[in-house]
Image (tube, grey):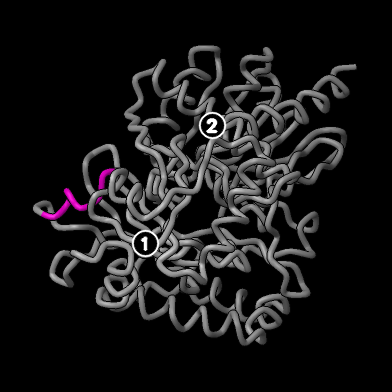
Amino acid sequence: MSDSTDVIVVGAGAIGASVAYHLSLAGARVTVLEKEPRPALHQSGRNSGVVHAGYNLKPGTRKAEFCVEGSRRLRAWCLERRVPLEQGGILVVAVDEDEIPTLEELQRRSDANRVEARIVDAEEIRRIEPHAAGVAALHAPEGASFDSEAFVRSLLDEADSRGSAVQYGVRVAAVVDGGGVARVRTNAGVLEAAVAVNCAGLQADRVAGGVASDVRVIPFRGFYAELVPEREHLVRSHVYRAPDLTYPFLGVHASRRTDGRVLLGPGAMLAPGRESYGLFGVNGADLAGTLAWPGFRALFRDPRFRRLAIREVRKNFRLVDIWKEAAELLPELRPEDLARSFAGNRAQLIRRDGSLVDDFLVRETENCVHVLNAVSPGLTGSLPFGEWVAGLAMKRLESARA
């Protein structure tokens, strides 16, 4: 492969596709390896399709920077390439006075991140979302919905038009430096290139091996319900509850997709496997690895996290628990308005001490770049994030050519 490829990218999700596209723009010969038969079958395709605005992210973090820039670039990309996009804004609702300080903190973060947002009163909530209710809300008009799978395909198409290639059905076990080249161990043998970029998402820490020995991907299952068709009119765009900023889970929210469906959720329970999307599809090795990780046990000793975990588990099993939370935002909602939809797994990186890695995390070796954490809103930030990672890879490629 080294004769025809400069850079191997592992993973054809949003980050891998963006890296491949930006590398191809820079003139590199790129091959993307994807174990599935088509792109975006995991985190990049199993999500609510929200274009986040960046109002809730800590100022000064790389995640905030890439989300805000990525939101604007993503919306422009979709419009230029006819990827389905609907921009109706996001409304973050305080259902009582106790949640007003959270809105004020979100407004502070919005201002620091240069995100268009403002706090509105109960009357304006009704104007923006006629069926929503609360004492106040933060309105972020740049929030939107898009077809994430179509977006990833468009990135790969653009990369393909510049000479890149995607090989499907190739499972990567590890990416390592070896003898001045990157060695990629796969089910098809060992492949070599000047540089390799690990964008394996839910499997990124395993592919990285010892480079990621101090962190572990812990999968959290996000289950969605959806409104029955005759009740989809209850939501125009996106309605969120004022979040608990202690943890990176945003609670139950209502989101209208570009296909007109309205999702409610997600829950965020521990997944029985990294790629197990059913409640009972247990992957024994994955689950054992999660339970054995010292960071997971440390996290579970926190009583606040245990209470959160119990609440989230209920939402994955019982629609009525999703309804109870959603009805605080949408008082007209009835239990029979909800139907079961789909689930996606979030790759949450956790350190040995139990702390959550809350920002993008990339580590480099001589010939490899490992994207270890591209947690939400990584999809929204995928264009600038992928461009930045591609820049890191190009520096290694130029060194290898010298």
Looking at the image, which is closer to me, 353 or 3?
Answer: 353
Secondary structure at badge 1 equals loop
Q: Which mark is residue 17?
A: 2
Tag shown at residue 134: 1
Tell whether position 283 is magenta: no
Q: Amino acid at mark 1?
A: Gly
Residue 367 position by quadrant: top right
Provide residue 142's location: percent of width, then percent of height.
46, 34
Please tell me whether residue 185 is drawn above or below residue 181 in the rendered image: below
User: Which stretch did the figure color magenta?
Assistant: 231-236
The answer to which of 48 and 277 lies nearer the viewer is 48
Q: The disc labelled 2 sits on which kind of residue?
A: Ala
Q: Is residue 375 above or below residue 178?
A: below
Residue at image point 44% right, 62% down: 94
Query: Residue at (13%, 55%) from the top-left corner?
Result: 231
Residue farthest right in this picture: 402
Magenta segment, prevailing SS (helix, strand or loop):
helix
* Residue 275 seen anywhere in this rendered image of the structure: no
Tell me which numbered mark, 2 or 1, is placed earlier along the sequence: 2
Q: Work out whether residue 295 or residue 127 is closer to the camera in this orientation and state it.
A: 127
Which quadrant holds the C terminus? top right
